[in-house]
Amino acid sequence: MKKILILIYFLTVSVQAETLELFWEDMIPKDYIAPQQQVSHDGSMTQQNLDAPVVRSLNGKVVKIPGFIVPLEGDNELTREFLLVPYFGACIHVPPPPPNQIVYVKFSGGVPIDNLYDAVWVTGTLSTDGWEGEIANVGYSLTGISVTPYDG
């Protein structure tokens, strides 16, 4: 038992040491300039900048990203799939951000989400393979390792 606990400790420390802390601006290529958007006051939920590029060098990296959860699949106890977005209400109350500002997250066994109003840190392996759903087109996907409260 002691050997298993030591192995788990070293694996946890190893993942933490290799984890890249990302913020949303890090997920936009440095030389990309978004086109000017037309302001719409018609209540449209149409996503803008569908061709917004991703940062290909992030592919396969273990990352930690802050954001808000938009649940897609799960039950009352566990959420298996969700979108991680940079601000509360994105994709639900306001139009979705550009694809390079949304991450599709999947936890094979599910993860408990306490409060959708709270910001969280999501850690996992990032992919630049996009995802398309009814709510939005997404530039990044992530295989989840953990969700923790955002500590600022």
Image (spheres, helix red, strand yellow):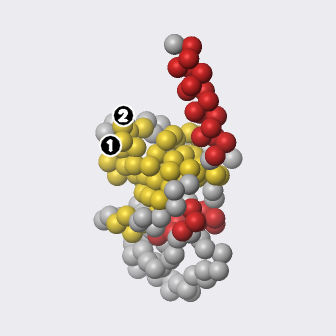
Residue in view at x 59 percent, y 71 percent = 28
Q: Which residue is mark 2?
A: 77
Amino acid at circle 1: Gly
Q: Which residue is mark 1?
A: 74
Q: Check if mark 1's residue and mark 2's residue have beta carbons within 8 Å.
A: yes
Disc 1 residue crowd, few under 14, some 14–19, many 20+, Cα 10 Å: some
Q: In whole angstroms, how far apart are the C-alphas of marks 1 and 2?
A: 8 Å
x and y percent of residue 151 in the render? 66, 42
Q: How many marks?
A: 2
Q: Quadrant of residue 23?
A: bottom right
Residue at disc 2, secondary structure: loop
Residue in view at x 46 percent, y 67 percent = 139
Residue at disc 1, secondary structure: strand
Residue 63 left/right relative to 134: right
Name above or below for residue 107 compared with residue 103.
Answer: above
x and y percent of residue 79 in the render? 38, 42
Amino acid at circle 2: Glu
Task: Tell me the number on the disc at residue 26.
Answer: none
Q: Is residue 151 visible?
A: no
Name above or below for residue 9 compared with residue 144.
Answer: above
Q: Quadrant of residue 32?
A: bottom right
Residue 136 left/right relative to 36: left
